[in-house]
Image: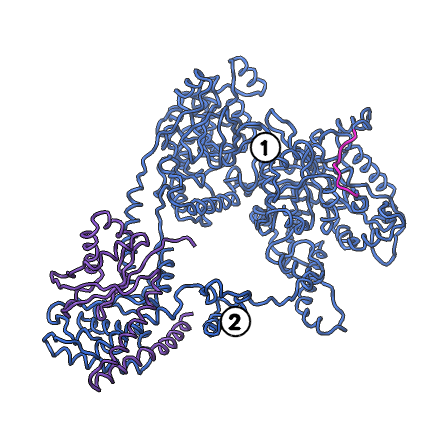
Amino acid sequence: MVRFKNRYVLCEVVSEDPRCRQCIEDRAVGLAVRDAVGRVHGDYGLACCSISFTVKYLNAYTGTVLLRCRKDSYRLLCSALPFVRQLESRNQRYPCSLNTLHVGGTIRTCQKFLIQYNRRQLLMLLQNCTNEEERRCIQKSLLSCSLTEEHSQSGDEEDDDGPE
Amino acid sequence: MSGAREKKRAKKMRNQPASVTLPAEPGPFPGGGSRACPPSGDVRSEQQYQQQKFSNQSSGPSYRKDQYFPKGQNRGERGRGRGGWQGGRVSEEMPKYITVSTFAQARAAEINAMLKAVAQKSSNSLVFQTLPRHMRRRAMSHNIKRLPRRLQEIARKEAEKAVHQKKEQSKTKCRKARRRHINLVAEFNRRQRKNIWLETHIWHAKRFHMVKKWGYCLGDSPTEKSYRACYRAMTKHCLLQDLSYYCCLELTGKENELLKQLARICSIDTGLTFEEACCLSGRFEGSLNLYRADRYPEDMLGPITFIWKPRDGSENRQLWIWMHPALKQDMLRELKAVFQCSEPEEIYIPEPITTTIQEEKQVDVVLSLGKKRKKEDKEGEKAVPVKKIIGDGTRDPFQSYSWISQTTGIVISDRTMEILRYRLIGPLSHSVLTETLKAASLQTEVADSETELNNWWVENCKDSEKVSLHQRQSAIFELLEGMSSPSEMPPGTILGLTVGDPRVNLPKKKTKAMPDFEKYQDNDKVRQLYLEGVPVDCAHSFIWDQDICKNVTENKISEQDLNHMRAQLLVPGSHLDLGPCESKIPILLVQQPGKMAGEDRPGWGSGWDIYLPKGWGMAFWIPFIYRGVRVGGLQEALKHSEYQRTPHAPNDFPDCQAGMQFAKELETSLLEKFKRRPPAKRANYVKLGTLSPFVCPWGQLTKNWEGRMKASGEFVHPSSPHPELCATEGHSFCDSKAEVVKEASPETGEVEETMEIISSEGVLKTEDVIGAQEFGERDETMTTSDFIVLRSEKLLMQLSAWCYPTAGKDRRLRLISRLGQKEMTEDVFLPILMSYPRALVWVNLSLLRKGNPELHAMICIPAEDDLVHLSKDKLFCGPQEPKHRDIFKHKVQKLKEEKKKKKKDNTKALESDPPSVPDKKTTEEHEDLILGLWSDALPDITSHCSRTLLGYVTRGDFSLAAGCGEALGFVSLTGLLYMLYNQPADKKGLVLLRTPASLQYRFARLNIEV
């Protein structure tokens, strides 16, 4: 099939300040990245990256951000990402940095990677936990995520059967 | 459209995770660590919950919340989570460390969302379509086991869905069973229950585009390329048409009783009446226009043709009235009213046989259909063969189709589909006829005493007088071959005949029938036929006798038997001689005169109509085809009448009910077609100055012209110079015109008064009518149209002479004197205007130079400059209409914007509250304004453009016969007279034509052919 090929960049917002989460929004992230690209690559780079550039997904609680840009210019984008230094929204500014996790050709691969990555994180957390309560807590959430999968599936099927 | 797209998109995106941000509450919650940790369950559920909590149930993204809390377990968790969260709320201080549990929970929630997005297929494609190519296998789509095992479950669910379920197998099994003769006939019978099929339906259906019209299935035009070939066949050889769908009403009764009542529904003014001597004798066929009783010239019913049965001694006469099916209901109603035939009496019907036959057949069919199953189950039960429906399959067997008058004993019976009618058009049509048909041989003994095959003929052959008549008829029929064209016969000649089975002498190969003139070169008999025509007694035919027709229909040898006999011939392919078993079929041949009016191409399109008893359709059709005729459909019939320049029913009768109905249907279909185009590609008719591109507003046209004349007072001023003269002239001109005028003629003042009354009434009426048209409905009270079509022969002759182009004055005078007409002066045409204030005239136009007129093209009066320019510059094609301003554009745009806004609101609502959207979106507001169409009530249509509008074209095309663009249409009588009066003598009859989608005017010559 003939289509425009994109690259999806999965990053993580790393910040010292927990309040930074507030700033994790579509607009704020997009502006910050754009700003960084403009600073690093100039107008040309900004224009290249702006073609079909969007924030496809973000999660303020985990700090995950999924960006999209054209395949031709993803190198420009990736090289500019380390230069994002702060996020600004509602007149509040918090220093942070972006950590690129994965670059994929489809959203789906990024999602798959994210699952894998989060699982790994949880497992790591489980290994490193210090007290019993924490261990229990993590185990529960680990179980919940695998359990809910089945649940959600069954629920979905009900949902599917409903309207049709 | 966009609604559907959005829905589709929503469906696609339902499994995709939405972005999760912190709630927009800056103040009291600076995003503490406890807040940042969503409780277990879904992140979005948490968020939604928060939103509900904090923004006072403002429209939060309640994105299928039930989906996220499918189980009570989750809900419990959520509850607990809320508790924890509330606890977190208490701690105002931002913690300096990360809580492990919240961290883990956030991750877990995200994993969940992602898993869902990844695991669930989101597209509309089927499961096997999502597989990579190298894993696809043949027959995967219907064999689930071909799929990888992990997908089998999903695929099974998918296959169970109703959408993908295959259509239920029809009860009739295989094709072989369906094509079995008995089942096929049953199926055909079922299918012709709704729309009547002609006997040649199957033949046509294989070769024609079929349309359902007027309750029939008719061939519209051939599927092959044949536009020009059909024209050639019409001019050089022979074109065949099945006109069996024309309706026949039979009137039986005493001659004077019939004539007395029939005189009320037609007028001597328009030409023939039923009383015409040569038609009354049964020698010629006549055609005329019917009006509602005593209402001439208003309330037109439609054109008909009629045939009287020749006198045969008894005092009851039979009369066939043939009409178009669209006109039938009105005419039947009117005839019933005129003859006071109200009760459908079955007892008195002289021909109850036909109905009973049908009854039997219908019952037969019903029974057999009902018992089909049973029959198949029980082989032993005697299978009743399903009979083919012959005639009208839609008739209700329990309803009578004859009506009798108690007082006069006149019977009206509907003989639609009882008599077949084929039309052969073209100069060689009679050689086709003579080659196909052979006069029946005499027969003195019955072939088989058991059947009643031919017993009527044997009976007949015993009478020497009838035998001699038959011989004379067949002699004349054979002489026909010596004629070079059917137009050489007197118009409407009728020849009755009894012929043998035409299937017997079917040629082995399709050949072209050509006449052999040398045989008849010096034949006095042919010359005599030219001069005298067919004698009266030869018009007699047994087709008038219904018993004989029934006998002939029932005793037809089936095609199968005939082929069987052919197979048993000693010498294969030799002539099959059936001997006494050969059927004898009574037929009627009627000559069609072709083009009679006008000066060019006299006799063009002449031919023969052949009337057959029903059931014999295909038996005659195939032999005709084998003689090399070409077959035409409705379109070809339309072209035929166009080249003949005759009005075609019901298209060109705007003053009768069927014509109005037709115009309405045409308008809706054209409007639909217009709307189907993308808006940017549509013609903007407002800018082009075309007020009504899809319909001709005749009422408004005549009304406007009347108003114009009144306003200008140019030649309808009240102080007429010679009131007396005017009145008397009026009297002499319109002998039996509208009675109002007649009564008022002694005093001119009275005339004016009545005229005014009429006109004021008319104005009101017109307004009503226009209003009604706006809403696309016309109720019963509006049936009396506010205009009439001028059909008085005398007046048309006069007009025709007036608009004749003349080079010099004397030629014109000569012409006028030849036609016995008067010079165009005020005295002459004023009374015409008086008596017909709102009349239309049927005109034909031929373009002088370039141009191809189209449907609903406008006929306009040329300005003086145009004529001057034309006389100076021979290559001048015509003036241009200046572009108009689209006064509706801003309105349309405003409407569009409003709509867009509404849509935006809708989409907003969609984002905020998706579950409630589907029912919201279904309400689609109706759009009244369409860009490019005049949406208000029409203004004065005559003066809307730079040239004054005179009338409209109802049919126009490049004429293959004339070699230039030709158009037929109606113009306002008032306007025409106004134009002719003001035009210079050598430019009379010059008009401008403009097609609706163009600004270019073209010169055309206007003619009235009588």
Along the line of sight, which residue is nearer the eye, A103 or B399?
A: A103
At x 40%, y 70%, the residue is A163
Picture layout, residue B101 above or below residue B327: below
Q: Amino acid at mark 2?
A: Ile
Does residue B833 lie above or below B134 as drawn?
A: above
The residue at which mark 1 appears reads as B643
| Rendered shade, chain A | purple
Q: What colour is chain B? A: blue
- Look at the numbered disc 1 and give the secondary structure of its residue: helix
- Spot occupied by residue B732 in the image (x, y as percentages of width and height): 52, 26
Q: Is residue B504 above or below residue B127?
A: above
Spot occupied by residue A53 in the image (x, y as percentages of width and height): 27, 55
Q: Earlier in the sequence, mark 2 or mark 1?
A: 2
Q: Which residues are magenta?
A: B508-516
Query: Could you tell me which residue is drawn at 38 percent across and 29 percent down?
Result: B881
Relative to the observer, which residue lies in front, B797 or B761? B797
Identify the residue at the far left of this view.
Answer: B93
B429 relative to B448 in the view: left or right: left
